[in-house]
Image (tube, rainbow, N blue to C red):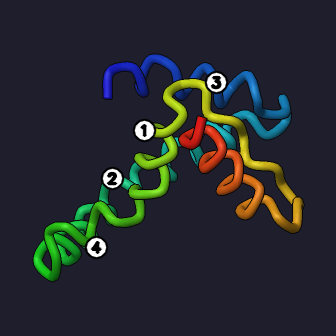
Amino acid sequence: MCLHGAVAAPLASDLAAPHLLSRSLALAALSWQIGLTLGPAPGGAGLVLSPRGVWLPLAPHVRRRALFGDHAPPPRAGAPNAARSRRLRVSARWQG
């Protein structure tokens, strides 16, 4: 949280148009507060229903990081066979 407080306000003020500066800062602060206020409710409900189920949405990212490390190729947006070509590259890498 300390890094967020030191970086968020200057970043929001740098990105905002001069005539919308106060609104941009208020919206940036409000967006974080809404997330911090409402986030624990669905997270807690998810943990009650299934302790492992909360982590399932992260599984593709963990798998990709395990296969490629820090050098993961970015997914190609709009490519019709992006998932298939990614599977082929992974299988070719493991076959030698």
Name the amino acid type tagged 3. Answer: Leu
> Crowding at label 1, few (<14), some or many (≥20) Cα neighbours within 10 Å?
few
Residue 25's x, y, as percent?
61, 37
What residue sits right under mark 3 in the picture? 11
Check the image and report above or below for 87 versus 92: below
N-terminal-most mark, 3 or 4: 3
Name the amino acid type tagged 2. Answer: Leu
N-terminal-most mark, 2 or 4: 2
> Crowding at label 2, few (<14), some or many (≥20) Cα neighbours within 10 Å?
few
| Side of 25 where 50 appears, left or right | left
Residue drawn at x 54%, y 41% is 94
Task: Tell me if label 2 and label 4 are in contact, CB under 8 Å.
Answer: no
Task: Tell me if label 1 and label 2 are in contact, CB under 8 Å.
Answer: no
What residue sits right under mark 2 in the picture? 36
Cα distance between the residues tagged 2 and 3:
19 Å
| Side of 32 where 38 appears, left or right | left
What residue sits right under mark 1 in the picture? 66
Check the image and report above or below for 27 versus 45: above
Residue drawn at x 68%, y 41% is 24
Locate residue 74: give its quadrant.
Answer: top right
